[in-house]
Image (spheres, grey):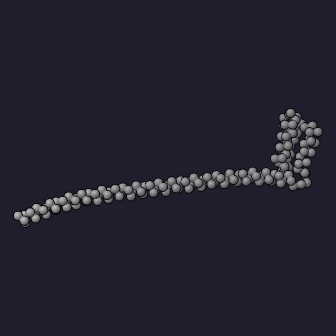
């Protein structure tokens, strides 16, 4: 019903500001004022769950605030952790990229050395073959 919705809306409003004084004028919501019986019922429910001279109301709010604050802090902590993780991942990727570039340079240098050594081998091999041939010819001239 309209009255029960207004009742719970008012109750939620009072609970939200239980640690701070709340000042309002009736009617709070657009459907007319609460009746005297509704106000007494509302106040009795509020006082039975949260006695006026007890700290349980503020303890409850502190507990709720504490849970919300822990959630907020956890969310901030998770965001910061994710940011650090992204930063570490980025640094790791940069390091791997640098290593890759260094290895490519080393590989190119080794290929160049291999090419030069291979060319030197071919030259020495041809020279050896030529010297052996010349040696045989000289031996034949001496023998003959």
- Residue at 16% x, 60% y: name it: 130
Residue 96, image x and y in percent?
A: 48, 55
Q: In this view, does 77 lie to the left or right of 127?
A: right
Residue at (75, 51) in percent of width and height:
68
Q: Report whether 130 appears left or right of 4.
A: left
Which quadrant does the C terminus fall into?
bottom left
The correct choice, above or below, for 41 with respect to 20 in the image is above
Q: Residue 73: where, in percent of width, then height?
A: 70, 54
Question: Residue 83, how many percent across, how many down?
Answer: 60, 53
Q: Residue 115's quadrant in the figure?
A: bottom left
* Residue 114 location (% of width, % of height): 31, 58
Counting the numbered discs, the total is: 0
Q: In this view, does 47 lie to the left or right of 121?
A: right
The residue at 10%/65% (across/down) is: 139
Q: Which residue ends up furthest to the left in the rendered image?
A: 144
Is 37 or 139 nearer to us in this picture? 139
Residue 102 lies in quadrant: bottom left
| Quarter of the rendering occupied by the N terminus | top right
Nearer to me, 144 or 84: 144
Farthest front residue?
Answer: 143
Residue 12 appears left or right of 118: right
Q: Quadrant of residue 5?
A: top right
């Amino acid at each position: 019903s309209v009255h029960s919705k207004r009742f719970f809306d008012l109750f939620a409003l009072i609970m939200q500001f239980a640690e701070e004084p709340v000042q309002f004028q009736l009617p709070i919501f657009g459907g007319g004022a609460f009746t005297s019986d509704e106000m007494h019922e509302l106040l009795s429910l509020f006082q039975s769950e949260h006695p006026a001279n007890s700290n349980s109301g503020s303890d409850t709010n502190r507990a709720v605030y504490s849970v919300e604050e822990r959630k907020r802090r956890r969310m901030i902590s998770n965001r910061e952790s994710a940011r650090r993780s992204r930063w570490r991942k980025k640094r790791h990727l940069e390091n791997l990229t640098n290593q890759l570039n260094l290895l490519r340079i080393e590989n190119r240098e080794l290929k160049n050395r291999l090419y030069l050594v291979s060319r030197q081998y071919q030259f020495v091999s041809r020279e050896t073959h030529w010297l052996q041939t010349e040696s045989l010819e000289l031996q034949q001239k001496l023998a003959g």
